[in-house]
């Protein structure tokens, strides 16, 4: 190496989707500039990993910074969890311009985010708001979410509007994201339970049935095929949907599937004691569903993980039916997946990097800038100590949300250091970053150079 590097991470287990190598990683400016044998790289500053894992910065493709955490808060919480890039859903509410929301969020995030960020669009009035899709592409936003659920709230996209949006997105080379649950069927079931004066906490799973998800996933991907539009399905929760994904994979469809840590670590029979705080959409389901999701991950049916971070102000005494869907999760995601996946022998470190970094970067169209520890990629690095035991609690989280779904959960493995584009963000238990550091990342979603690695 002809010049001394700005920063060297020394003596680390460098993790890639296909291998783990012991060595050094060097950064010059904002980019990775060298990868070599341990002790060979020289830097103006050296961080000794001490044999810990060295990961590429993780990417969360699924956050909602509009509740108790705004864009800056979400980025701050994410960084503590080893995440160096977030992709927020920038929803345009009824009457709003999607284009203006995107411009506003780009401006806000550019001054408040300590890590890099991308944006998805999100339609509540799809038939009308989708007319702005071409202009949104010019702003660097190439993926757009629609809901097949929440008809009573006025959020649901019918098949006509969905196909219109997919046609436009597909022609422009983007990606449609779909919250896939049959909203009209769910509304009927809820009305039926209301008429019975049912206990909604006890019967919550009935209002988010696995078949309603599986049907909507199949429909969404099929309509995407019809319009030649890649489809991204977030927060898959059920065994029935795993069967649908297996069928769709056999067809070779242009679709990507995400699941979330709460579906991989929790079951409703144990969580329902928390009442409204555990109300997530789609619902957290059974042990059978959890086992099927892990089996699907091992079989290569899933592409990525997302937190679905939606920290909402809920209290145990709130009316369960009226309580909002969603909960915090961006900061705990890596630790929960590591505990339930790696520590329990279900997946390995390479799988975590593949699904949580490289695949996500490819799907968003920000690879190879993000997602891998290669020369020329951004200097986004996470040092992770696999031996440290600790207990997750709301008291040690950095979200403004006053609760966590994992209160009291003991995990082994903890983020030690986080570096974003060569700059320290988290180090020795301290925040060392800057709220103005993060940059907006234009995406080329759904194009997947080289293909998502399964």
Image: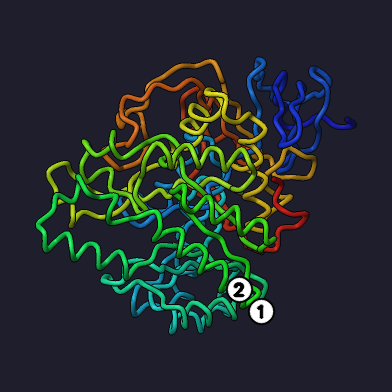
* Residue placed most toward the observer, 11 or 279: 279
**Which numbered disc covers residue 137?**
2
Instruction: Determine the image quadrant of residue 245.
Output: bottom right
- Viewport quadrant of the C terminus: top right
Q: Determine the CA span between mark 2 and mark 1.
A: 12 Å
Q: Residue drawn at (32%, 71%), measured in percent from left and top?
A: 184
Q: Which residue is labeled 1 in the image?
A: 171
Q: Pointer 2: residues within 10 angstroms few (<14), some, or many (20+)? A: many
Instruction: Determine the image quadrant of residue 157.
Output: bottom left
Q: Earlier in the sequence, mark 2 or mark 1?
A: 2
Please state which of the two labelled residues, at mark 2 or mark 1, is closer to the viewer: 1
* Residue placed most toward the observer, 179 or 367: 179
427 lies above or below 304: above
Q: Residue 360 vs residue 264: left or right?
A: right
240 lies above or below 268: below
Give the image location of residue 61, x and y in percent: 53, 52
Question: SS for tag 1?
Answer: helix
Q: Residue drawn at (13%, 53%), measured in percent from left and top?
A: 198
């Amino acid at each position: 190496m002809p010049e001394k590097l700005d920063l060297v991470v020394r003596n680390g287990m460098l993790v890639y989707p296909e291998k783990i190598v012991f060595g050094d990683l060097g950064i010059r400016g904002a980019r990775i500039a060298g990868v070599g044998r341990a002790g060979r790289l020289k830097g103006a500053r050296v961080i000794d990993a001490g044999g810990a894992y060295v990961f590429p910065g993780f990417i969360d493709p699924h956050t909602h910074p509009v509740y108790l955490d705004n864009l800056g808060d979400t980025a701050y919480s994410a960084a503590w969890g080893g995440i160096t890039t977030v992709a927020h859903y920038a929803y345009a509410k009824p009457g709003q311009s999607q284009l203006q929301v995107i411009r506003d969020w780009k401006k806000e995030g550019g001054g408040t985010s300590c890590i890099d960020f991308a944006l998805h669009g999100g339609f509540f009035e799809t038939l009308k708001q989708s007319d702005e899709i071409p202009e949104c592409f010019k702003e660097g936003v190439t993926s757009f979410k629609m809901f097949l659920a929440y008809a009573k709230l006025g959020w649901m996209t019918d098949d006509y509007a969905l196909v219109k949006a997919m046609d436009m997105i597909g022609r422009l080379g983007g990606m449609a994201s779909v919250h896939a649950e049959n909203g009209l069927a769910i509304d009927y079931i809820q009305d039926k339970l209301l008429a019975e004066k049912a206990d909604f906490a006890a019967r919550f799973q009935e209002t988010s049935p696995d078949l309603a998800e599986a049907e909507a996933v199949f429909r969404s991907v099929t309509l995407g095929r019809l319009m030649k539009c890649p489809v991204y399905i977030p927060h898959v929760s059920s065994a029935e949907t795993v069967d649908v994904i297996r069928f769709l994979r056999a067809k070779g469809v242009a679709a990507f599937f995400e699941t979330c840590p709460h579906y991989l670590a929790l079951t409703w029979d144990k969580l329902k004691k928390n009442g409204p705080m555990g109300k997530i959409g789609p619902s957290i389901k059974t042990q059978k569903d959890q086992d099927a999701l892990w089996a699907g991950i091992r079989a290569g049916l899933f592409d990525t993980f997302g937190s679905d971070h939606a920290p909402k102000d809920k209290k145990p005494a709130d009316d369960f039916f009226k309580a909002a869907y969603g909960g915090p999760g961006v900061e705990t995601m890596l630790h929960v997946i590591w505990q339930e996946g790696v520590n329990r022998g279900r997946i390995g470190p390479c799988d975590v990097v593949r699904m949580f970094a490289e695949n996500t970067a490819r799907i968003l169209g920000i690879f190879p800038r993000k997602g891998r520890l290669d020369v020329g990629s951004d200097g986004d690095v996470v040092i992770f100590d696999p031996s440290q035991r600790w207990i997750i609690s709301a008291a040690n989280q950095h979200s403004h949300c006053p609760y966590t779904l994992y209160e009291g959960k003991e995990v082994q493995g903890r983020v030690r250091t986080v570096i974003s584009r060569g700059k320290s963000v988290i180090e020795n238990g301290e925040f060392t970053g800057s709220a103005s550091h993060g940059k907006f990342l234009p995406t080329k979603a759904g194009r997947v150079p080289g293909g998502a690695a399964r």
